[in-house]
Amino acid sequence: MLSLTLKEAVHKLRDGSITAKDLCEKCIERLNKTQQLNAFITETVDISRDSAAKTDRKRQKSKPMRWRKLEGLPIAVKDNFCTTGIRTSCSTAMLQNYIPPYTATVVQRLQDEGAYLIGKTNMDEFAMGSGSVDGIYGPVRNPWNYKFTSAHLENQQTKPIEQVNMRNYHTSTEDWHIAGGSSGGSAAAVASGVCFGALGSDTGGSTRNPAAYCGVVGFKPTYGMLSRHGLIPLVNSMDVPALFSKTVDDASILFNVMAGHDVHDSTTVTDEFNHFTLSDNISIKDLHIGIPKEYHTPGLSKDVHNAWVEAADMFEKAGSKVTQVSLPHTQYSILCYIVLNCCEVASNMARYDGIEFGHRATNEDSTEELYAATRHEGFNDVVRGRILAGNYFLLRQNYEKYFAKAMKIRRLISEDFKKVFASGVDVLLTPTTLTAAPTYKWFTERDNRTASEEQDIFTQPVNMAGVPAITVPSKLSDDGLPIGLQFIGQNFKDKELLTIAKWYEQQVQFKQLDLDYLDNVS
Amino acid sequence: MWSKQWKSVVGLEIHAQINTESKLFSGAENKFGGPTNTQVSLFDAAFPGTLPVLNKGCVEAGVLTALALRCTVNKVSKFDRKHYFYADLPAGYQITQQRQPLAVKGYVDYCISDKNNFQTKTANITQIQLEQDSGKSLHDEKDKISLIDLNRCGTGLMEIVTEPDFSDGTDASAFVKELQKILQTIQTCDCKMEEGSLRVDANISVHKPGERLGVRTEVKNLNSIKSVSKAISFEVKRQIELLENGGVVENETRSFDTEIDETVPMRDKEVKTDYRFMPEPNLPPLHLFDNESVKTVASKISVINIDDIQQKLPPLPEDTRKRLEQQYCLKRRDVAVLVDNSGLVDYFEEVMRLSPTTNAKLVSNFIINQLLGVLNDKKFTIHNCPVTTDDFGRLIDLVQTEEISYSTSYKVLDEMFEHPNITPEDIVEQKDWRQISDTQVLTNICEKVLEEHPKIIAKYRKGKLKYLHTLVNKAVIDSNNKGNPRILKQIMEDLLDNK
């Protein structure tokens, strides 16, 4: 049952061939058996059971009630989307006891269509990272190639809230692969079959990166298509709510439920959203695929490179025009991103002072001392480092040198995309990551900044331009780890992008991770 | 005297709370005096994930104000974050318009009148920007606790910045008064300085003519017209004395202590803050339209058309002053008094409408010199004045037709306040206050006076003309104060010259 796609699950729930309760119990069982992945920070099992029961009662009512688009469907939500009455920690000590009094618009829209929350997923602190290893709840493990042992299964641990420095968090001496980040928990949850779709956020690749590593679809829509109201910000001008699913169709279904203007977010598009479904018979004849030459970088692994070339061939053989294109300013993107990211982080983090909400230190000798102690205790090194750098970049004498310059280059990067698309290219095809998922040991030998620079290289320029992008699993590496390829589309042509991605998905027939064997382990 | 050698320069920054139902970026209620922390949205308290949504009403108020202050409204303006840590600023930054404000380059004509001086001046407006107000902090020094009230936090403010165009406290306070009038006329701010809905900061420096401007100080949070005037006067004097004695003026922020009428350094001497301005990423640029550009917009729902707002601009105090001057041939000084006092213009014009033949100057004199005084004495305002405009006009007619004397009119007006139901004519009748204008009767009185005072006549004849006045006064007294002074004077003159 857990290997169903979202589309299939919704269908079976509607026609009554499965009950919401059965589905819910299956998901909870899988949740329990995959505890070792550390994908969830907060599990909302009670809410799940209540919601499933409600769905089933709906069916028994004499009067037929409106059967909603996602009726009875469990979803997971990254722990930086606010959820009324449910802790929203952002994986930081600052908010580890924070229970928001409101729900993010995108979560609300899913719930309004009948989906329910199975849990809040693990992430890097304040989404600053690309490995999901830098949060206070410990690292997320990639379910691929993960050796679940009975010892692990017995250890139904309680979450180590008190543990603050989790970088050296090991429960077994064996190494494992990271899930990617910062939305690693959501990626692992979908890949391991706990839920049929999940929300992540994507600022520089935080959804596409873990989706690629975990072998699922990761879709970052055009900036402004999904409301950020209730998403705890990292970089407001680049943050996009994004989604994980097993298939492109599933991503399309979730996207259609959430998209459109929100009065609470002035940066959402005001034009009316036209709902769509993706066709099953897709022709890619006369399509123009661009291959950005700058994406051929030294660190690109052979496996990923091969997958990329094969995909390009596939399109060409099917009648698409495939040409090399250039995005000349891409090389400056990461440096620019670091400056802009730090500046917005410095600004966005200013509100965490322990006065209105969140962690508050006990030092109350003066307001300033209270602030200092609260912020020192509440933030990890990565966050504090970015705040410091950001405030430096924003100083009066530095503003032009750093922030203003980065904004100019950001515009050039954005222009690169525009020019390429104006020249007739419909979509760009690139790798999502340099390699398949690295091991935890390898990854943690790097500091957070170096890792981010390497990890975000193919995903990050997209956020500078606001254009939509999607990663689709293509094949397995020689080590048996999934490899994702990225399609980059034009602003507001989310449907076209999804359609092309779906065609590719149909060709590769990627086999999802199957953890059904866990059902038989007692 | 040193005052001749020094020139003072004053510029103002005025924060005017926008008179809207809800706040600048949130739907929370926007009222003065609500119970503590009851008008606070999640956004106002800076809860993570909340976003600003610009209140269209605030923008419209800002545009109307900009037009009233003859500013150029920017078709595109932008919002910025200004960072500083303070407990009553929950986000750690204020959203303001630092780089591209709502409007720039305007001016205000205003009148200054003190005892011997009346003039019209022009002050230049540098810019108007929209921004958020902060909350309020209360510090309990003894128990070492701070209490925060966020009711005010997020209220829309218009920051109105002037050029350094003012010469002293009187000048600056006259401008603030005019600004108050304008904002109240267009109803974008109630301007209750005592409630803090209009707050004034003054930048003050002194220098010797021909030399470059001196170091300035900023006096913050002046919350009455009187404080504006007194604080600036004090600060100018303080700086001059300091410099005269070989001291230097420090670039600092001061506050005005109304107990001792002196400016004092602010207790928390802020270290020079770098506000680390940054564009606000959650608000798209604010686009405003005119009749031409609005045609290109598909959806008109959230569109603000500057030309539409221009149409709504009511006559401003200066417009009214100019109109009254022209329409009724009144003196500017008198017109200024009428316009300065709420309701007087309407009262004046109502009197003129009911009795169009009445002399307008006489009416305005009566209102300014008599009515205002009586209203003050009897604790009335023009809005609850018991004397109707009709009765007031008839009282003036009685003077104009010389039925009663000017001095008698004071007494009649007093009676009218006591007995609003009795007409002025009836009062004159009942009290027997009618003026005697019969020449025969008055000639008799004059002749009698001349007979009795030959010595005064002699003095008059020697060329001391003021003795005519003495003689007329005696005649007025002999007539029981009822003789028409103008006719008495004429008769007296004729009699003297013909004798």
Image: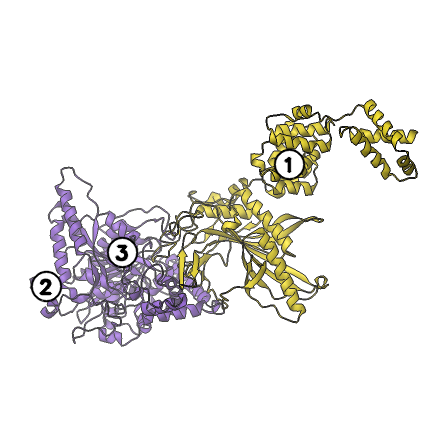
Q: Nearer the viewer, mark 3 or mark 1?
A: 1
Q: Is residue A514 visible?
A: no
Mark 2: amino acid: Leu
Q: CB of mark 3 within 8 Å of CB of mark 1? A: no
Q: Which mark is residue B371?
A: 1
Looking at the colours in the rendered structure, which chain would you say is drawn in purple?
A
- Specify the quadrant of the image occupied by residue A210: bottom left
Q: Which mark is residue A518?
A: 2
* Point 63% across, 71% down: residue: B247
Tell me the chain of label 2.
A
Q: CB of mark 1 within 8 Å of CB of mark 2? A: no
How far apart are labels 1 and 2 at the CA level? 96 Å
Tint applied to chain B in the drawing: yellow
Residue denoted by label 3: A500
Q: Secondary structure at mark 3?
A: helix
How far apart are labels 3 and 1 at the CA level? 84 Å
Please tell me which residue lies in front, B249 or A508.
B249
How far apart are labels 2 and 3 at the CA level? 35 Å
Q: Which mark is residue B252?
A: none
Mark 3: amino acid: Ile
